[in-house]
Image: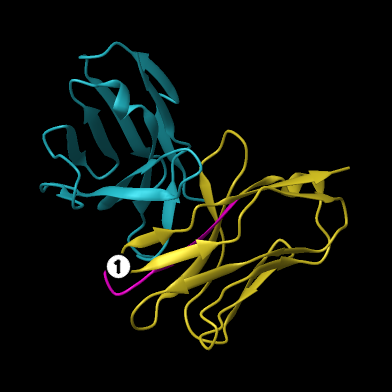
Amino acid sequence: GAVVSQHPSRVICKSGTSVKIECRSLDFQATTMFWYRQFPKQSLMLMATSNEGSKATYEQGVEKDKFLINHASLTLSTLTVTSAHPEDSSFYICSAVRGEGKNIQYFGAGTRLSVL
Amino acid sequence: GDSVTQMEGPVTLSEEAFLTINCTYTATGYPSLFWYVQYPGEGLQLLLKATKADDKGSNKGFEATYRKETTSFHLEKGSVQVSDSAVYFCALIGANSKLTFGKGITLSVRP
């Protein structure tokens, strides 16, 4: 199967610090990865589309300077929440697309971020 | 824009009960429709999909039929098991090639 690993699964940080979340495709190459945010009792909201070797495409309303995305290799994308504040506390989920099934996204287990 | 509406939850059923989880959508054109499942502590997994009207997706005893006339993609299972306890998300990919999710519904199955 297609496995996507997301790390860390849970992180607690102080307000004003930065947090990096990693998303790895373990057994396939992913030219495209996606980052979602999920609020309690809400659906997953797409934040940005990450393409290997190019700049990420952000959805309307998502601050690119706040949520830095790097997709430096075909198996790794990172999301850095810069100068985190309590309102950034949320569940962040990544997904990756295999080349042959462009409509199928494989998801990581998510990262619970809590900013104190 | 595209949207997916799921019935409100949570849903609690006894083992071997019949399951229906409603899902309706709004989209331009002909979207592909999906059901994803998230077991406790795990990432979302694709459960089944349908790419055109009247298609029936099926997997692990679950079924859903793409109904264009009612813009629906209801998930059904004839006999649920405790191991089916999870969060279920209905989703679509529309003309913008992006996944749009419903809010998800938590299913708990009692022994």
Q: Is residue B89 above or below residue A72?
A: below
Q: Is residue A31 above or below residue A108?
A: below
Q: Colour of chain A?
A: cyan
Residue at 36% over, 57% down:
A98
Q: Amino acid at mark 1?
A: Ser
**Residue B110 drawn in magenta:** no
Q: Residue furthest front?
A: B8
Position in image of residue B27 (x %, y %) = 37, 75
Tag 1, which secondary structure?
loop
Position in image of residue A38 (x %, y %) = 41, 41
Residue at 44% over, 22% down:
A10
Q: Nearer the viewer, residue A53 or A21?
A: A21
Query: Majority secondary structure of the magenta segment?
Result: strand
Residue at 40% over, 66% down:
B3
Q: Which residues are magenta?
A: B88-96
Q: Quadrant of residue B2?
A: bottom left
Q: Which quadrant is the N terminus of chain B positioned in?
A: bottom left
Q: Would you call the spot at circle 1 few (<14 residues within 10 Å), some (14-19), or many (20 or more)?
A: few
Does the rendering let one see residue B64? yes
- Of all chains in the rendering, the one displayed in yellow is B
Residue for badge 1: B97
Does the rendering let one see residue A29? no
